[in-house]
Image (spheres, helix red, strand yellow):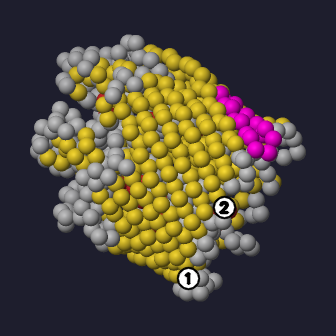
Amino acid sequence: MVAVVGLALAGWAQAEQASLPTIQVVGEIDNATLRANPETLARKQAKDIRDIFNDAPGITVGGGGLSAAQKVYIRGLEDTLLNVTIDGATQSGNLYHHQSRLMIDPALVEKVEVEKGTASATAGPGALAGAVRVQTRNARDLLQPGERVGARLSQGWQSNEGWRSSALVYGRFTDTVDAMLSYSRQQNHDYEDGNGQRQINSASQRDSWLAKVNWQPSARQQLTLSHNHERDKGVRNQRPNMVAWAANQPLPQTLERDTTTLSYRQKEEGGLPGIQASLYHTKARSTRQTVTRLAGEEVASHGADVKLESTLGRHRLQYGINWREDHAQALSPVNRYNASVTNGADNRAEEDSRVAGLFVEDKITLGEQWQLALGLRHDRYAYKDNHNQTYRSSGWSPSGALTFAPNDDWLITASSARSLRGVGLKEGFDLDTLIGGEIVRNLPNLKAERAQKHELEVQYQADGWKVGGSVFRQRIDNYVAGLDDGRGNSGAVRIRGFELGLQYSQARWNAGVSLSRSKPEWDGRALADYDFGLGSTYGKTLLANASYRFPTERVELGWNGKWVTALRYTPYNGKEQVKPGYNVHDVYVRWQPVEKEKLFLTLTVQNLFNKAYYDHATYGYHAGMKRLIGLPEPGRSIRLDASWQF
């Protein structure tokens, strides 16, 4: 297999002793993979998903500075179209379109991988816009050679505005068993934008804990049991991603997730295949305390995945199965079997779905310069909606990539992938809520959504230089959306764009720059920020970074810059508007006072020049109110953190 490491189409790898950016491209020939790791997140003092992805080309996070409102957009498509897993557990469904779908404490992250665009056959069912895979930390990675027990304490403060405390303990009980327990609390007060305007009802309290036990009976086997709990609570506007007005009053709200996973890993050896298997259960829950009741919604999933890997001569095979069942329900429903409202008489305020799939992928080495990757998966979906209507979908999803490496420096890859997502759960909010005076009802002829992507990548790496570029086209047919007569298939979504990256590294310093652009359209209209559940359009994005390390003083300095061009768009029921462009700069200083002690002091300044701006993916202008009602990005934030691992 031909592989390239550290190619920056969308972020840049750096020498290990130098500063790494938050997102690093590692690439296998058939799909560039973005990765984040604990060291890069610590340098940024990341506190939410915006901090994880804000310097990744092709990716943006809308929702302002309120973590419960943030959504991830990859090449213009929202995270509802992604296959998202945390420690192998699929995070399916969508609770409420005005709030975040992804919850993870960055301090718990060991690795984040992102496949941009329609994903390969091994990425799981329904990966229309790509895949995000989050892997949390474990004791074995934290323990030093000869160490039996350890701990890590961290205390942070930020001027805009709040604090964070975390504690992590880990140990090896026997030569084969290790465990860890982590807890953190983050208290955020109402933040200020770049104009000094305090964003009322943006305060929150976030609690996160992770427990994990590993048993490694042999060098090639590992069994892991983990549980992760995330909770974000606060008094927020009823629509958290919008400012307060008469119809958007503050309510006590809670957004939480619990995920339990049992996984087994076995390395390929002695003619036996490698195995990655997992069983999981995950539940996401959103509540809003009104004057009369505790309203909200819940989505629970349980499933199993098995992937085997075998090497047969020039063939590297991956094959396996995926299975998942989902259940969504409205909490404290008032319109369950309510004949006085349209579509209410047969509304049970809950839904069920399941999917089962088979997949295989073969990476074939064709001499020293060529590799061919061929993948195929088949998925079968079944869905019973809140009105007792049943839907079944099935289909094939092929993928392929051809790579040519003329020498050790160059890599050229052409890839194509298709993906099918069967008819499935509505947004939880729609199961009991009156939209236009009626309960949302599925149309009887709903079809599965289908996506396809074509991409060409060129990559070069030599003598400290890393250069990369890609052009891509993507299409989604039969997109399921809310229509005038119910929930049904709408027109086609088309995306085209490019990504370019350039980076140079030496032992002590590195610098890089990238440019990206994606243009998503829905039936010929550019996606706008009100296209909840689908996507948004944002301007051309230029990213730059630089860092320098002083090894004797054990000091590291870094800078990141982001420039986004202005964007013309048409808001819902409104006239053409312009989203202003902006540029933002972040800097950090990281110091290790004692050489042999893992004590680190970090000073980070985000939005150094206190720029007032809105991310282009954030809901913005409301035509009826004739003003911006989305949340702006935070102004300058000075962050201090002290962490000690011992």
Asked whether residue 366 is drawn in magenta, I would say yes
Which one is closest to the eye, mark 1 or mark 2?
2
| Residue closer to the observer: 195 or 201 | 195
Relative height, residue 253 to residue 594 (above, below): above
Please name the residue shown 50% across and 16% down the image: 392
Q: Position of residue 180 (x, y in %)?
A: 60, 62
Q: What's under tag 2, amino acid-wise? A: Ala
Q: In the rendered image, is residue 352 in sight?
A: no
Looking at the image, is 75 positioned above or below residue 209?
above
User: Which segment is the magenta one?
Assistant: 359-376
Which residue is drawn at the image coordinates 55% and 70% (left, top)?
510
* 566 relative to 541 in the view: left or right: left
Q: CA distance from mark 1 to mark 2?
A: 25 Å
In the rendered image, the residue lying farthest to the top is 444
Q: Is residue 472 inside the magenta stretch?
A: no
Q: How far across and down, in percent of the image, does residue 482 sit?
A: 31, 25
Whether residues under marks 1 and 2 lie with C-beta atoms below 8 angstroms apart, the answer is no
Q: Is residue 214 left or right of residue 339?
A: right
| Magenta region, main secondary structure | strand
Percent across and percent down for residue 20 are 55, 66
**Label 1 SS:** strand
Residue under label 2, please give it: 462
Q: Please state which amino acid type lies under the numbered disc 1.
A: Phe
| Residue that numbered label 1 is attached to | 550
Q: Earlier in the sequence, mark 1 or mark 2?
A: 2
* Image vertical order of residue 184 relative to residue 573, above or below: below
Identify the residue at image location x=41%, y=31%: 494
From the top left corner, tell me how far across and down residue 513 is, in percent: 48, 60
